[in-house]
Image (tube, helix red, strand yellow):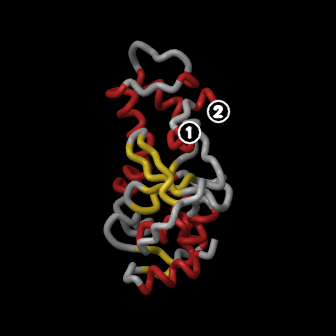
């Protein structure tokens, strides 16, 4: 994955890029929010920080807004549990009541998804390099790029070539992409 080349093309295309975060700034974000950026996400943010509407501003954005963006994937799944009868068989029998609390307990075990742009997410670490970028809207989850560089080219540089399958899987979230009940994987 050549993020330097992609960032140069993004800059030429008019995507605003601020200087990258320092190691101390990255560590401070991770400490404040309780996750670790995966290697690809960390590499992007130390090379350059894309800024503007729908990009998370890890240094200056209101902390409650960033926490809401971090909560979006789990909160969306909970909406489908409560309102649309989503309940994977791997979670065991669906409780008659307290489904939200039970779902949140199960979801506390899946990888934390970290916002890249809008409702596009990468898993927190540990995640293999080349992890796919996911578009998450409740339990409607798709791969939006086979890795971070591929995603950035597709979303911002209008690359439309056929996407190859994701090179790595992310527990639970990849199952939603595949439409597979996690209990069957």
Kindly give the residue lying farthest to the bottom in the view shown. Answer: 12
| Comes first in the chain, label 2 or label 1 | 1
Image side of residue 65 versus residue 1, left or right: left
Question: Which residue shows up at 39% across the image and 73% down it?
Answer: 51
User: Looking at the image, which residue is at 44% across and 65% down?
Assistant: 58
Q: Is residue 114 visible?
A: no
Give coordinates of residue 32: x percent, y percent.
50, 56
Q: Position of residue 148 (x, y in %)?
A: 55, 65
Circle 1: element type: helix
Image spot of residue 141 (x, y percent): 45, 45
The residue beneath circle 2 is: 185
- Circle 2 crowding by C-alpha within 10 Å: few under 14, some 14–19, many from 20: few
Figure quadrant of residue 140: top left
Q: Is 107 in front, or is 160?
A: 160
Eyeballing the image, is 52 above or below 56?
Answer: below
Q: Is residue 175 visible?
A: yes
- The reply to whether discs 2 and 1 touch (Cβ–Cβ < 8 Å) is yes
The residue beneath circle 1 is 175
Q: Residues within 10 Å of mark 1 (few under 14, many from 20)?
A: some
């Amino acid at each position: 994955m050549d993020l330097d080349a992609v960032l140069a093309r993004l800059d030429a295309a008019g995507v605003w890029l601020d200087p990258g975060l320092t190691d101390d700034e990255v560590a401070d974000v991770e400490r404040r929010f309780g996750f670790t950026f995966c290697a690809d996400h960390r590499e992007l943010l130390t090379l350059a920080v894309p800024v503007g509407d729908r990009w998370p501003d890890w240094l200056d954005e209101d902390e409650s807004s960033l926490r809401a963006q971090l909560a979006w994937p789990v909160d969306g799944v909970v909406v489908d549990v409560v309102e649309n009868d989503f309940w994977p068989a791997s979670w065991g029998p669906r409780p008659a009541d307290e489904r939200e609390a039970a779902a949140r307990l199960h979801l506390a075990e899946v990888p934390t998804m970290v916002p890249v742009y809008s409702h596009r997410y990468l898993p927190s670490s540990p995640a293999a390099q080349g992890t796919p970028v996911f578009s998450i809207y409740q339990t409607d989850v798709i791969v939006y790029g086979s890795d971070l560089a591929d995603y950035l080219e597709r979303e911002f540089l209008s690359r439309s070539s056929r996407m190859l399958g994701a090179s790595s899987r992310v527990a639970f979230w990849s199952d939603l992409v595949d439409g597979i009940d996690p209990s069957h994987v």
